[in-house]
Structures are given as C-alpha cells and as structure tokens.
Image: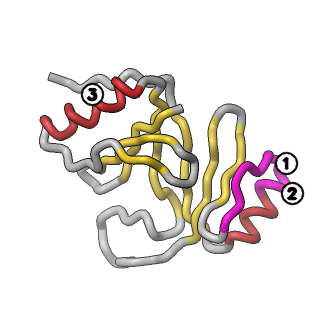
C-alpha cells in the first residue's frame, strides 16, 4: 500500500555550490532575495515560501554513475509537513516499506523535526516540519 504523505509541497531546496561568496553575491545582491541564514557551511534565502539553501561542494566519486550530494548541484529536497503525527507516521511507513531512513530527527540549525530518506538513486529527500 502506498505511503501517501500529506504535504503542502516543497519546503526547501538545498544545492551545492563551488563558491559560497559568489553564490551569496548572486542570490542576495543580484537577485535581491532575502538572506535568512549565513554560516560558513550553510546559507539560505527566501524565494516566496520556498527556502533556497546552499552548502559548499565537497566533490566525491566524480567518476561514479550514482548520485552524490557532495558535488555541485542538488544536495537534497524537502517536502513540507505540518503535523508531527504525520511526520511520525511517514517515518514508520518508510521503515515498514524497507526504505532506509533516519527516523524522526531534530535539525539543530532551524529547530525543526524531519525524517530523511533516499530514493533508489540515493537522492536524499526529507519530510520536514513547517
């Protein structure tokens, strides 16, 4: 039976970039997006209701044919979740379906609960509290 998570859509998108300062200048100074987080390893901007986040690239396995979140490009995707009971249900259903996941965890930077899991290509998804 499908898990069918109840979500309001994409919560945040995290990308890996080659130069944090250049990326910050483009998204903050050129595009004019409001910056909401600025640390050496993570910065984030608001794009409407979407949080657009960036981490520095740390290339690994460049020759591999499988996704790695450390190269330039996509780091992970997060779907919004508005109910802690739904977050717990999805974590349990993922485990029941044999999908490796973190269980419900706390994001210590944003103080939000989430569950992370990977698709068959090892692309990381999160179900993340709003």
Residue linked to disc 2:
29
The colouring scheme, among rainbow, by chain, secondary structure or one colour, is: secondary structure
Q: Residues within 10 Å of mark 1 (few under 14, many from 20)?
A: few
Residue linked to disc 1:
32
Horizontal arrangement in the rendering, residue 70 relative to residue 36 (left or right)? left
Q: In the figure, residue 26 lies in which quadrant? A: bottom right
From the viewer's perspective, is residue 2 above or below residue 30?
above
Viewport quadrant of the C terminus: top right
The answer to whether marks 2 and 1 mark residues whose Cβ atoms lie closer than 8 Å is yes
Work out whether mark 3 precedes mark 2 in sequence or the reverse, and give the earlier one: 2
Task: Give the x, y percent position of residue 125.
Answer: 38, 46
Query: Quick check: is 33 in the magenta stretch?
Result: yes
The answer to whether marks 3 and 1 mark residues whose Cβ atoms lie closer than 8 Å is no
Give the residues in magenta.
Answer: 27-39
Horizontal arrangement in the rendering, residue 24 relative to residue 112 (left or right)? right
Q: Residues within 10 Å of mark 2 (few under 14, many from 20)?
A: few
From the viewer's perspective, is residue 24 above or below residue 60?
above
Work out whether mark 3 precedes mark 1 in sequence or the reverse, and give the earlier one: 1
Q: Residues within 10 Å of mark 3 (few under 14, many from 20)?
A: some
Task: Give the x, y percent position of residue 57.
Answer: 54, 72
Horizontal arrangement in the rendering, residue 114 relative to residue 41 (left or right)? left
What secondary structure is found at the residue carrying circle 3?
A: helix
Task: Give the x, y percent position of residue 1.
Answer: 14, 22
- Front position among marks 3 and 1: 3
Residue linked to disc 3:
89
The answer for how far apart the CA atoms under marks 2 and 1 are is 5 Å
Which residue appears at 67% of the width and 73% of the height?
Answer: 19
- Front position among marks 3 and 2: 3
Nearest to the observer: residue 55 or residue 107: 107
Which residue appears at 54% of the width and 45% of the height?
Answer: 111
């Amino acid at each position: 039976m499908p898990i069918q998570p109840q979500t309001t859509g994409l919560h945040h998108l995290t990308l890996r970039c080659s130069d944090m300062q250049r990326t910050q200048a483009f998204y903050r100074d050129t595009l004019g997006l409001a910056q909401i987080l600025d640390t050496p390893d993570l910065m984030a901007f608001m794009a409407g209701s979407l949080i657009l986040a960036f981490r520095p690239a740390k290339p690994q396995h460049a020759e591999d044919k499988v996704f790695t979140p450390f190269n330039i490009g996509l780091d992970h995707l997060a779907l919004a979740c508005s109910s802690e009971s739904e977050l717990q249900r999805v974590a349990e259903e993922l485990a029941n379906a044999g999908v490796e996941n973190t269980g419900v965890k706390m994001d210590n930077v944003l103080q939000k609960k989430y569950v992370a899991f990977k698709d068959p290509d090892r692309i990381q998804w999160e179900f993340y509290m709003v």
